Image: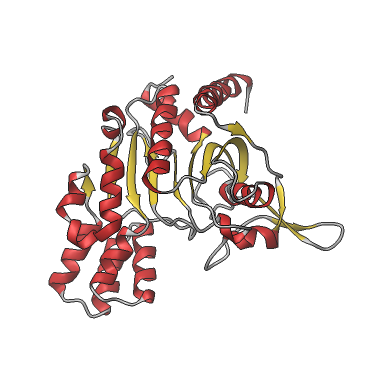
Amino acid sequence: MLPEEARELRAITEGVRAEFESAGYGEVKTPTLEYADVLARGELGDVTPSYRLVDDRGAWLSLRSDMTVPIARVAAMRYPADSEPLRFWYDRIAYQPVPALQGRAHEVQQIGIELIGIPGGDGDREILGLAARALDAVGLSSARLVVGDARLSETLLRAVGVSDGVIAAAHDALLAGQIVKLELVLGEAGLSVTEVERVVGILRTRGSAQVLAEHATELGDPGAELAATIAALPEAERARVIVDIGLVRDLDYYSGLVFDAVHPALGEPMGGGGRYDDLVGRFGADRPAVGFALAVDAVHRAQTLGGGA
């Protein structure tokens, strides 16, 4: 990274930091290296790939691959469960193994926030609002927030009677964007052709919050909660929201709201986040939590290609 680019990236982080601090968030820094067995508490299912090494006493260490798990550990271990809501911001490097030939960086500078201790719609709205204001602060007024809920697809699939294994396979197909595979998974589970088309059609639905009302019966309480959260946003922030019923995550700790920050100049999200009410409790007392992060380099590319500054 040469001086000109470094100055531009610093301007991004300074603009976003100002928004976070004006909202009452304080900076937190966690170690680059964490004990692997401690980070593993934050994982369900398959262990997330990471860079590992052995220290001088034989213990396995991991380079952090995201910031949410380390900050959940800090909240549980350093703050009493009955303390006031915690508002943290960070600007750190995450180290993420990347499959060969993808051309993506292994070191990702992330700037983000974690809100711990405020459940449900109140916390979700705070995070969505700050995400919108952070994008405005870096000149990306055309960016949008693609919003869903980790429970929507599961609610829909359970309603048609498929097993946990089928739900997991369907989520994998959604995550990879493999719609044909999704149709095959549901067909092999015994759904009729008509039912497969109906379910897949709902999972592929994007649009305004009106799509949640149109499928309210199939989406149950999670759909109603997400609709209420969006409806209570200020008009300017609500206008940035695109609902994606089939939005899922490859991290198992998400328990509610999930969202991506997207820009028309890029082919992939610049960042995202969501609710993880069950994560802090893996390190101590249960506490509701929600957060998001932006990849600084992706924001910079969006500015360069889309005219933001």
Instruction: Specify the farthest residue to the front.
Output: 82
The answer to whether 237 appears left or right of 109 in the picture is left
Among the 4 quarters of the image, the one containing residue 209? top left
Place of residue 291 in the rendered image (x, y in percent of width and height, measured from the top left)? 48, 43
Residue at 48% of width from left, 60% of height from top? 252
**Figure check: 157 above or below 289:** below
Residue at 27% of width from left, 79% of height from top? 188
Place of residue 295 in the rendered image (x, y in percent of width and height, measured from the top left)? 51, 37
Residue at 40% of width from left, 43% of height from top? 124
**Viewer-side residue, 195 vs 123:** 123
| Residue 254 appears anywhere in the view | yes
Place of residue 215 in the rendered image (x, y in percent of width and height, measured from the top left)? 18, 56
| Residue 245 appears anywhere in the view | no
**Viewer-side residue, 273 vs 188:** 273
The answer to whether 36 appears left or right of 188 in the picture is right
Quadrant containing the N terminus is top right
